[in-house]
């Protein structure tokens, strides 16, 4: 219940949209998200879908992040975007963090808090799902940058899904997952 009350105050958070040389338009986000379509959240509101929040402020140098928290110890939360991978794209770079103790609704320091991330890409031409990574990030680690070879998806329409789940050393302690910049190169 406390999380629900806190989240009611968080209408707006930002994560950079997938960027490439060519602008990708994917329509509007899920209206239930209530992303503010302004400032750092404008890209998020039009291109990402999630049941998380857009935080327009800055967290350790990263401005605009999608914040998601697992629904329960057994049920992850997800942010996703469907787009066509440019034919020239070969690399996907994602920046993520556990922001427990670093956001206005959770200011109690918690360097030992951690969250699991699972990165998946679905090729919509044949509905095949590919897990790119599964890893745990602690709040003390700050922002982590991960890079993936996506050359097999060049020119294809895909859905990129970034899941946050309860994992790591202490399950169900500070799983405030943040998704920062997401880029295609």
Image (tube, rainbow, N blue to C red):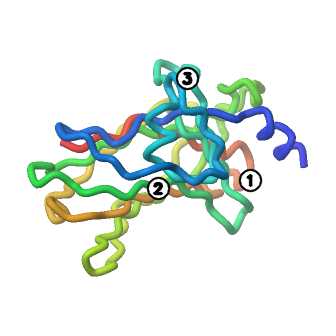
Q: 150 above or below 16?
A: below
Q: Nearer the viewer, mark 2 or mark 1?
A: 2
Across and down, in percent, residue 135 comes to: 46, 54
Q: Earlier in the sequence, mark 1 or mark 3?
A: 3
Name the residue located 66 percent from the left edge and 46 percent from the top edge. 175
Q: Position of residue 35 (x, y in %)?
A: 60, 39
Sequence order check: which comes first, mark 2 or mark 1?
A: 2
How packed is label 2: few (under 14 Cα within 10 Å), some, or many (20 or more)?
some
Whether residue 169 is visible to the viewer of this picture, yes or no, is: no
Residue at point 39%, 39% (across, down): 17
* CB contact under 8 Å: marks 2 and 1: no
Q: Nearer the viewer, mark 3 or mark 2?
A: 2
Q: In terms of depth relative to the viewer, which is nearer, 28 or 41?
A: 28
Q: Residue furthest right?
A: 1
- The answer to whether residue 52 of the structure is visible from this angle is yes
Q: Residue at x 29, y 38 (%)?
A: 19
Q: Work out how far the residue at label 2 is from the one at label 1, CA to CA, in angstroms.
A: 23 Å
Question: Looking at the picture, how far across and down is residue 51, in whole percent?
Answer: 63, 53
Please identify, in this view, whether the residue under mark 1 or under mark 3 is nearer the observer.
3
Give above or below for 67 relative to 170. above
Give the residue number, with chain letter if any, for mark 1: 172
Q: CA–CA distance between discs 1 and 3?
A: 22 Å
| Alpha carbon separation for disc pair 3 and 2 | 21 Å
Crowdedness near tag 1: few (<14), some (14–19) or many (≥20) residues, C-alpha within 10 Å:
some
Q: Which numbered circle lies on residue 80? A: 2
Q: Residue lying furthest front in this view?
A: 27
- Tags 1 and 3 touching, CB below 8 Å: no
Quarter of the image with the C terminus in it: top left
Q: Residue at x 59, y 36 (%)?
A: 54
Furthest residue in direction left, as rendered? 88
* Numbered mark located on residue 59 in the image: 3
């Amino acid at each position: 219940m406390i999380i629900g009350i806190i989240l009611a105050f968080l209408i707006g958070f930002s994560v950079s949209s997938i960027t490439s040389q060519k602008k990708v338009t994917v329509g509007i986000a899920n209206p239930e998200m209530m992303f503010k379509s302004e400032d750092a959240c404008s890209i998020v509101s039009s291109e990402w879908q999630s049941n998380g929040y857009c935080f327009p402020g800055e967290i350790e140098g990263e401005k605009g992040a999608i914040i998601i928290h697992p629904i329960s110890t057994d049920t992850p939360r997800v942010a996703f975007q469907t787009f066509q991978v440019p034919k020239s794209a070969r690399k996907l770079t994602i920046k993520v963090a556990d922001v427990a103790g670093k956001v206005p609704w959770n200011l109690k320091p918690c360097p030992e808090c951690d969250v699991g991330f699972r990165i998946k890409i679905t090729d919509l031409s044949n509905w095949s799902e590919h897990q790119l990574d599964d890893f745990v990030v602690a709040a003390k680690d700050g922002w982590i940058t991960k890079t993936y070879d996506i050359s097999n998806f060049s020119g294809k329409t895909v859905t990129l899904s970034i899941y946050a789940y309860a994992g790591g050393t202490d399950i169900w302690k500070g799983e405030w997952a943040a998704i920062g910049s997401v880029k295609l190169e």
